[in-house]
Each structure stands twice: as structure tokens, then as C-alpha cells.
Image: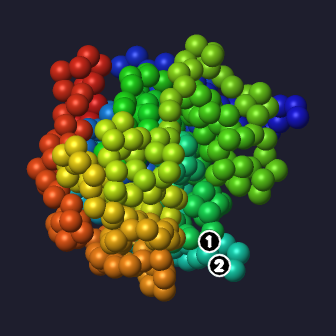
Amino acid sequence: MSIDSSRAPVALASYDNSPDSLGRALELCEAFSDFSSHHHVMIKPNLVAWDEEFPIAPFGVYTTTRLVEDLVILLKDYGCRRISIGEGSVEIKKGVGTKAAFAGLGYTRLAERYGLELVDFNESKSKAFAVGDDLKLHIAEEALESDFFINMPVLKTHGQTRVSLGLKNLKGCLKKKSKKLCHHPELNLEYCFSHIADFIKPALTVIDGIYALEKGALHFGNAYRKDVIVASKDILGADLLGAHLIGFSGKDIAHFRHYAERRNQSLNLSDYDIRGEDPAAHIKPLKWDWIWTEDNTGPGIFAKMGITGPALPKYDDTLCSGCSPIANMANILVLSAFKGKPLPKVEVLNGKKMQGRAGYDQTVLLGDCIIRANKENGNICHALPVKGCPPAADQVAEALRTAGLDVNIGAYRDYMNGQSVKYQGKEGYESRFFAV
Ligand code: SF4
């Protein structure tokens, strides 16, 4: 396929600690060729979740507040009068969501300084869009109604979808129920969320690659300083280049394929008009997957430590962001119960479709979905359901204790505190990027 000259260019710029870096990227991709200062702009950063108890190390997880401020300055220079910033963060704990993320990452001050509107998509009215006969996506009205929607994801990998870039970032515009519905037990997660861009139609995608995240999802993963910005009016073009910079071919990403097929759009980067820096100079392949034991009984570390007895099968793509921290907590708690001797035969299930296997004395079911999915499962000798959507952490620990595992909640706290502070004092990891 030859270059489609009608397709919007894709820009790659180095980030050099100045708003000029973003300006260069936007100029190269002709970002504002259809822009009018009368437009109402909606900026959608990635503020995936906020956790006051165990603050998430922000690098590679959140869009840098710095780059959002740079964008606001540029928009103001263009004479733009109405700018909103919208997000629908996951509530890891009830009542701690988008507003907490806005406050914690400096957006409240940013809004005051520049006269911006902050929108919590979780509280918005929504419009429903049918995708085939089986899926209805409820999208926040404000995300649909702006004149110029700017999508600002982070350059990161993801344990369920390999990469989380422009197409995935739009999932934050869904109402909570639709977010959960995307992790559908029969329809594929990536098929579901790949449709959101069809309805929102971002005018511009800017991938913040000041940091890039390996093995990403919520609290976890390893961030690297990368100092690049990718920008395009073509969301798939931006995502293809972003993925390429962290070692992924577009053909390997299912949600890219779904989106591209509907548009008859190429997945070959060579078919796009790439401008600015040479991508080859910025490629650093990143891992995305977490290794599990061969018999699917726990994370790779279980085999290394010689843990026998429990089985915690690997999460699948039906595990949504609400239960994801809980599932990880269960892994850490089971590790904490290991004292060098075989542990009780307990299986711990999560998500929406895992099925309890025979041979376990007890089966802990984490959350309403998995309880429902195993209601009629004859393999289960004794079920320990932990109700909730998501279930509460203390009840999960209690169920594991009831199953005979001497878990230590302090070990989980230590692990999470370690995750929160793991970049402290390291060169290049600067909290100023996430403050105003
Ligand atoms: S129970 Fe867990 S997996 Fe199911 S919808 Fe709720 S948060 Fe998601």
C-alpha cells in the first residue's frame, strides 16, 4: 500500500523541557489547520485512578500535568477562550475518583490559573451508542459535544491490551457501567473499546512520551524516561508510531486491527507520513506481559519460591480496573502466607469467566461477577464468595484466612508503599512534571 497523502501526518518530536517541544510536534502534524479560536476544546489526559492510601508513582502512569499545561498555553496563544479538561478515573475506593486525581495532580490549580473547566465524566450525563446487537456504550456527553477533542494518552504498555495509547485512553470517557461492560465475557475487550473513537472522533491525539511504562496497569510497571512526543490528527497513525517506539508492530495489537479494519486503514507505519525525528533513533522495546507458572497457579515468583497448594490463575481481559488491584492483592497476600511449607489447596478466581477447577478444597471467588460465573460449577467443593463490585480489601484478606492461609496484610502495605516510592531519588524522575 502506498502513502495515502490525504491521511494526516504523524509527528515525532523530542521533549526538551520546554513548551516549544509540543509546539514543534503540533506544527509538524498540522494540528490546528482546522482549528478556530471559537472552538470549545476538551482535553482528555490519562488520570487512570487515584489512590490516597497508596499514592501511585505517577511516572508513565498519568499524562504529565506539565505537558497538559504546555498545551493550554499554546491554545491560549491561539486565542482559544473555552478549554475543558475531562476524565473519568477509576474509583479504587468509593468516592475517590476523578476529583481526587484532579486535585492530586495539580489540575485544580491549573484550572484556576487559566480559567479552565474540569469535568468528571463519571458524573456526566451520557449518550448511548449501539455496537452491533450485544453492546451499548454510554459515553459522557461533554466528551461528545466539544468542538475540538484533544486526546492525551501516555506512552505505555498494558497487561491486557499490550499497549495503552490513544484508542485505549478514550475508555475514560465511558460511564462506569460501560467501562465494566467492555470487559465482556464473550465479546473481546479490545473489540469493545476500539469503537469509542468512532463516536468521539478526536480532532488530535498527543501521546505524552516524557515517560514510558513497561508491564503497565494501575500501580505497577516500570517507568523509563523517554522524552518524546507523538502527535497526529489521525488517532491510529499516532498509536502506530507510539507502539513502534516501544517495540510493537501495529498488526500485533488487536484493538488497532479492529479499528483499522472498519476504516480500511493501513497498519503499516511505512504507509504514513511521519515527520520530525527519525523513529529509529527512539525505539526501546518494552515488555507488557506478566509471567505465570506453567500450570497457571500463580505469578512466576510462586514457582521460584517453591509455593505449592494454592492456585491463582492468571487474570484475563474480563478483569476490570475495579477488581484488578484486588486480584493483585490476593497474589501478594498468598505470598505472605508462605513459610517454606506446602499451603492449603485453595483456588482464587477473579474477573468474569474463570471456572473453578477440580482438586481444590476451597475456592475463593473475588467479586460479584466471578461468583455469578461459578454458581453452577460442580468442580467447586466449598466456595468462599467475597461479594462486591469490587469487593473490599479486608473481606478478601478475611476469606483467604478462612481458607487456611495465614496472610499478613502488612506485607501488602509494604509492597504498595514500595511501589509508591520506588523512583524516589532516582535521576530523571521528577515530581514537578505532575504539579502546577
Ligand atoms: S465485580 Fe469486579 S470484575 Fe466484576 S464488574 Fe465489578 S469490578 Fe469488574
- Quadrant of the rendered image containing residue 276: top right
Residue depicted at 32% across the width and 34% down the height: 59
Q: Is residue 183 left or right of residue 130?
A: left
User: Looking at the picture, how far across and down is residue 249, in whole percent?
Assistant: 67, 34
Q: Nearer the viewer, mark 2 or mark 1?
A: 1
Q: Residues within 10 Å of mark 2 (few under 14, many from 20)?
A: few
* Mark 1 C-beta to ligand 1 under 8 Å: no
User: Looking at the picture, how far across and down is residue 306, in whole percent?
Assistant: 33, 41
Tell me the number on the disc at residue 134.
2
Q: Are marks 2 and 1 in contact (CB under 8 Å)?
A: yes
In the structure shown, which secondary structural element does the residue marked by tag 1 occupy? loop
Tell me the number on the disc at residue 186.
1
Kind of residue at disc 2: Asp
In the structure shown, which secondary structural element does the residue marked by tag 2 occupy? loop
Kind of residue at disc 1: Glu
Q: Nearer the viewer, residue 133 or 80?
A: 133
In the displayed orientation, state which residue is furthest to the right: 1
On the question of residue 257 being in view, the answer is yes
Instruction: State which tag comes first along the sequence, 2 or 1.
Output: 2
On the question of residue 151 being in view, the answer is no
In the displayed orientation, state which residue is furthest to the bottom: 376
36 shown above or below 125: above
Which quarter of the figure is the N terminus placed in? top right
User: Looking at the picture, how far across and down is residue 98, in whole percent?
Assistant: 29, 59
Q: Nearer the viewer, residue 71 or 284?
A: 284
Residue depicted at 43% across the width and 68% down the height: 359
* Mark 2 C-beta to ligand 1 under 8 Å: no
147 shown above or below 283: below
- Quadrant of the rendered image containing residue 208: top left
